Image (cartoon, grey):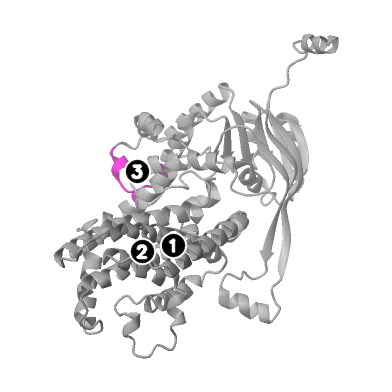
């Protein structure tokens, strides 16, 4: 009994570590890189008969472990093909880990490719409901926020035009407006900070800043260290699917520039 | 199990939206709209009646009603499985970017086909009234084939949707299989009227034929045929089990192939 009391008293003294929201342990993702892609029955059987079904294994991620706490803004640095986007996909839940575990404790809104869930024959207004339902929103919630979404996207009358007639900037604006209407707890950004024209860029950057002030957890993928310095407080470096460095954003960015960019 | 159920209820609204999208887009560019769902079976029924009315002989059953029963069930099975087959690949770009339970796609496409099928039953009601077929309490039995045909179609659709991810040419193969199924459904003739049936077993193993037989029985006021009922029920249960198992096992691999 006395031990318990000691523990309770001790707690406020420590600088309380924030809640872990993402925990990745020993993550590995394996792809089968077929040398020639076999995707028809005919080919499959021909190759089966000739015993030519070979698969080349490729680990996009291997032994990656890290923890992200609430309110952290983590930059994921790495060259092309380092496994950055694969890592985000695993955290967003679209890709399954081959080994290891990924635990995500709060709601994730992936801004991977804005407007990926749109149907091109549907109008902007209809797509708000469709895309919203994919992100797990309820109908009443979308009804309530509908005007706000339309207003933020600045689409005006275009909201009743099929999305196939939109410019890429308009699509992205609508996607951004729908995805950020919820105040998500974890935000996944895959180099989407350059959405739309200069005016909208500023507006979206302000919106993201406000969310960060409210304590949203951010995962940002980038190969530009300046962006990471601006936004993040922590960073990790991936190299050929392995976690090679992690720590404070400034320090990691320095080391990243030193060993990857200025080296050659 | 409980988490799966909770997950389903979280995405219930998505299912509704996907079904709505299927139906809305199907009729957006057509002038007649949903009316087309009624007109299409009516027109094929008229054509089949005109061409094949000699095949049935002088029975006391109404030939148009006989044809329509078979034709409606078959066309639901055909469109339901065909759209489910394509459902995963059609939504590839979404599957790669946003997490949703993947079975929602084949489920939504089967359910939207089923909804259109239920609407098209209005034609049957109209033709039954026009032909003055006497309806008895046996009509209640029609619920059995109407429910079973959904599970049969969804089960087969689940299996096809998985296989289609890995084998793209399945679509063409399935069209051929569907044709075979159609000819063994006895839509516009009677099995008994075939002069010398050497391959009667082929009708006994077609679960869709079993459903059609019982649907006709119910409409024409006869009791359900027990062999056909149990066979269709067993078959539907088996394809549902295989389909769910296959889908569950393979769904994480989809993203690597689409």
Q: Nearer the viewer, mark 3 or mark 2?
A: 2
Q: Chain of mark 3?
A: A
- Residues under numbered marks 2 and 1 in contact, where contact means CB atoms less than 8 Å apart: yes
Q: Which residue is mark 1?
A: B153
Chain under numbered label 2: B
**Residue positioned 71% across, 78% down in the render:** A51
The picture places residue A232, in percent across and down from the top left corner, at 65, 30
Residue under label 2, please give it. B76
> Dot 3 corresponds to which residue?
A126
Residue A32 lies in magenta, yes or no? Answer: no
Image quarter where the N terminus of chain A lies is top right
Image location (x, y in percent) of residue B167: 55, 69
- Whether residue B129 is visible to the viewer of this picture, yes or no, is yes
Distance Cα–Cα, label 3 vs label 1 = 29 Å
What residue is rendered at 38% in x and 30% in y?
Answer: A145
Task: Give the residues in magenta.
Answer: A157-171
The residue lying toward the viewer, choosing from A86 and B246, is: B246
Farthest right residue in view: A3
């Amino acid at each position: 009994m006395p031990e318990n009391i000691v523990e309770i008293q001790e707690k406020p003294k420590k600088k309380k570590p924030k809640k872990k929201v993402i925990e990745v342990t020993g993550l590995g993702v394996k792809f089968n890189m077929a040398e020639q892609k076999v995707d028809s029955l005919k080919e499959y059987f021909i190759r089966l008969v000739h015993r030519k079904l070979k698969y080349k294994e490729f680990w996009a991620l291997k032994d990656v472990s890290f923890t992200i706490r609430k309110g952290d803004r983590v930059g994921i640095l790495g060259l092309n093909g380092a496994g950055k986007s694969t890592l985000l996909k695993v955290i967003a839940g679209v890709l399954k880990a081959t080994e290891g575990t990924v635990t995500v404790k709060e709601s994730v809104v992936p801004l991977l490719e804005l407007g990926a869930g749109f149907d091109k024959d549907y109008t902007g207004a209809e797509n708000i409901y469709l895309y919203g339902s994919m992100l797990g929103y309820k109908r009443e919630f979308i009804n309530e926020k509908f005007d706000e979404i339309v207003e933020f996207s600045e689409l005006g009358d275009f909201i009743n035009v099929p999305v196939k007639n939109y410019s890429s900037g308009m699509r992205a604006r609508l996607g951004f407006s729908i995805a950020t209407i919820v105040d998500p707890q974890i935000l996944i950004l895959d180099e989407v900070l350059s959405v739309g024209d200069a005016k909208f860029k500023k507006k979206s950057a302000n919106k993201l800043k406000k969310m960060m002030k409210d304590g949203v957890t951010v995962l940002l993928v980038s190969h530009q260290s300046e962006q990471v310095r601006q936004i993040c407080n922590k960073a990790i470096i991936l190299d050929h699917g392995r976690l090679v460095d992690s720590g404070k954003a400034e320090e990691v960015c320095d080391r990243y520039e030193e060993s990857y960019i200025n080296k050659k | 199990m409980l988490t799966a159920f909770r997950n389903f209820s979280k995405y219930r609204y998505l299912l509704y939206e996907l079904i709505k999208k299927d139906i809305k887009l199907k009729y957006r560019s057509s002038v007649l709209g949903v009316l087309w769902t009624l007109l299409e079976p009516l027109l094929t029924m008229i054509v089949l009646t005109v061409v094949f009315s000699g095949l049935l002989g002088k029975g006391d059953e109404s030939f148009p009603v006989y044809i329509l029963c078979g034709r409606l069930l078959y066309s639901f099975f055909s469109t339901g499985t065909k759209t489910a087959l394509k459902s995963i690949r059609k939504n590839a770009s979404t599957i790669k970017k946003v997490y949703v339970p993947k079975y929602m796609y084949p489920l939504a496409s089967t359910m939207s086909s089923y909804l259109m099928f239920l609407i098209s039953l209005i034609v049957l009601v109209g033709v039954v009234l026009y032909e003055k077929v006497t309806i008895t309490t046996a009509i209640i039995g029609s619920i059995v084939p109407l429910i079973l045909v959904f599970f049969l179609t969804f089960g087969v659709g689940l299996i096809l949707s998985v296989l289609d991810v890995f084998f793209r040419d399945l679509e063409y193969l399935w069209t051929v299989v569907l044709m075979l199924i159609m000819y063994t459904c006895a839509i516009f003739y009677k099995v008994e009227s075939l002069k010398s049936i050497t391959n009667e077993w082929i009708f006994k193993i077609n679960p869709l034929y079993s459903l059609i037989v019982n649907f006709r029985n119910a409409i024409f006021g006869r009791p359900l045929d027990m062999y056909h009922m149990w066979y269709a029920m067993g078959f539907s249960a088996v394809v549902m089990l295989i389909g769910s198992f296959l889908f569950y096992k393979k769904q994480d691999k989809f993203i690597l192939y689409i």
